[in-house]
Image: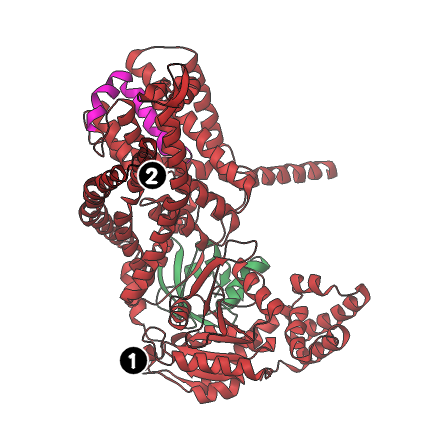
Amino acid sequence: MMPLTMADVGENITIKKIGGKDETKKFLETLGFVVGGVVTVVTEINGNMIVNVKDSRVAISKEMANKIQV
Amino acid sequence: MSIKIALAGNPNCGKTTLFNALTGSNQFVGNWPGVTVEKKEGKLKGHSDAIIVDLPGIYSLSPYTLEEVVARNFLITERPDAILNIIDGTNLERNLYLTTQLVELGIPVIAAVNMMDVVAKNGDKVNTANLAKELGCKVVEISALKGTGVTEAADKAVAVANARRRMIPQHSFEGCVEHTLAHIEEAVLHEMPEEQQRWYAIKIFERDEKVMAQLNIPADIQKHIEQDIKACEDEMDDDAESIITNERYVYIGTIIKDCCVKKNKGGMTTSDKIDRIVTNRFLALPIFAVVMFIVYYVSVTTVGTVLTDWTNDTLFGAWIIPAAQSALEAIGCAGWLTGLLVDGVISGVGAVLGFVPQMLVLFAFLAFLESCGYMARIAFIMDRIFRKFGLSGKSFIPMLIGTGCGVPGIMASRTIENDRDRKMTIMTTTFIPCGAKLPIIALIAGALFGGASWVAPSAYFVGIAAIICSGIILKKTKMFAGDPAPFVIELPAYHMPTVMNVLRSMWERGWSFIKKAGTIILLSTIVIWFAQSFGFANGSFGMVEDMNDSLLAAIGGAIAFIFTPLGWGNWRSAVAAITGLVAKENVVATFGQLYGFAEVAEDGTEVWGSLAGSMTAVAAYSFLVFNLLCAPCFAAMGAIKREMNNAKWFWFAIGYQTVLAYLVSLCVYQIGTLITTGTFGVGVIAAFVIMAGFIYLLFRPYKESNKFTMNVSSVDAKAKAKA
């Protein structure tokens, strides 16, 4: 397992675990970040990333991306 | 009897476009009670008895964001007659997540699958007949942008609302979850209408605090339910909320398999390809700079200036004012009334309206950037930079709009969900020089710095520095302590906006400014006009010819001493600063009138000589800084008050801005004078003390890190005690 921030751009990756405070976790879940879901990193700027999840693009900050283990 | 239809859907799914298509111009905009989330209602075209309520864009009915709370409160307390759920057809999976929750409310739902034209273009297929069967509600294919299917969707929504048939959700959860839900319904909810029970049961299962508080469940029953939930959690090896979320996605997965055929699976979409370039690590900032340069070049220097000059000089200057003057004189209107109407009202309001064309051009650009999807990317690009001083990337958009006018800038802060971040953005947005502050900059630069080219950029620099420093200082106070909210924003797919939508959004922002000009500014110009035209002359109160005798001069003289430490303690400058509160560009006009010129050019060329004689260059710069940073004009203050939605916060914001302006100007003047003339006095000492305090506030540790070291030391102490 590694944090999403370390994933390569363009690769299909499966989410293994979502950490963080309950509220953060739930918000990520409603956006489609669920354990077992497949995401793709579109771009990355200094740790902030744009992630393709369930056919939509979501921009998340480094802090959030670090809480997602893939 | 009228029926109410709620329009619900994810952000960026085309909800606003559909709402506009359904209601036309028949809309009422207000706020949801108690919060600054916009509430839009409208009469449905062709059904005079049907009202459409536009709910905020939401991803789910959980209680985590303000929008979600507002939307679900409306749905469960007011229970509309039907829900028109708009679904982005290109992104079914995520959009259906909300749908699965809406159908549980028991309110009849019509699902409108939007962007069917894009779906068809991509070569994908959505089988709406299957979708209807799986969801248990009617499904309509629409394209809100093209207007296809919209009427059909509306008609169906009206039909189900009138039929009043309850909605039966088709989905069932895992056995043990259903078992627990049945228990909850039996124990707590049996008195509720049957169709409402399921949604409440699921929320109780998720331990939703707001629902629990609303239902006020007796302690013994609650304990009993808790046991059931716990047992279920143990069986599924997950927490209750995640069980529900995961099951929903599994359910949606099966729906998608049945209803949706994708042509290119997992490939890069056009939006992804654009994002690769536009938000690229190296290219993002240069591309952004070029876009901004074009926007400002066109709206400020070329098209915008032409339009603004025409409005100021020709429309008001050459046509309306002389026409009004002669018309009033022709009907034999009293001199004072003519003065009030022409010099007070028309000139005052006209000066403000002169900025409207320029602003409209800027707003058209911003609306374009917003609706094509680039604005959300800007927030993403700027986030890492803004985070360094305690703001989020979303704060950038209000500031960007604020360079045109602070009023819509402050209003744009609504998109920031986090309350602390939003308040901080509202407080700092007006530090950026807005369009109306430019004439002041031109005046000072021309009068005292020989038109030096560094003055204008330095004003922007002062504004940006004030935002950065304020961000850091405020973040370290108890009120704003804590990390900025984690940045999460959905990036809509890039698309070409329609002309209508851009114009509509441009007009909405521009109109809010024009309305201000017609109310607050109108009123305050009358007050200022009165104060400057009336006064005590020759021993009696009445209209005065010489402004030196006016009430305004008396007030200015009385308060001028406050500004002596800033280097411009003469009554004219004090009065100019006061009139600046009405509208910043008034400062120049006031100087003109106070030095006895009836009409001055926008940059006040005529008064340059007099102004240069009355203050030093350093004092003038201090005057400029004060006007840039102090409380904005009445219109912007009104916007701050409305967006803060709280009198205490409003006064805190205004107070902070004014105190900061005062202190910075004081330092500028005192230290500047020390450098240029070598004069040393009490003021200089005060300036150094303020500087020291300022530096302390900037560099003192954050509140959390304070706590952290305390924890460490207490752990140390415990360790020592053990040893």
Residue A34 inside the magenta-drawn segment: no
Chain A is shown in which shade? green
Q: Quadrant of residue B557?
A: top left
Residue type at mark 1: give it: Lys
**Relative to the observer, which residue lies in front, B463 or B588?**
B588
Residue at left 57%, top 59%?
A23
Residue at left 55%, top 82%?
B162
**Sequence-wise, which precedes: disc 2 or disc 1?**
1
* Chain containing the residue with disc 2: B
* Chain containing the residue with disc 1: B
Residues flagged by tags 2 and 1 on a common chain: yes
Q: Which residue is mark 1?
A: B121
Q: Residues within 10 Å of mark 2 (few under 14, many from 20)?
A: many
Q: Which mark is residue B345?
A: 2
- Residue B13, can we see it? no
* Residue B402: x %, y % from top left: 35, 45
Magenta residues (range): B605-631
* Residue B212: x %, y % from top left: 70, 64
* Residue B372: x %, y % from top left: 31, 63
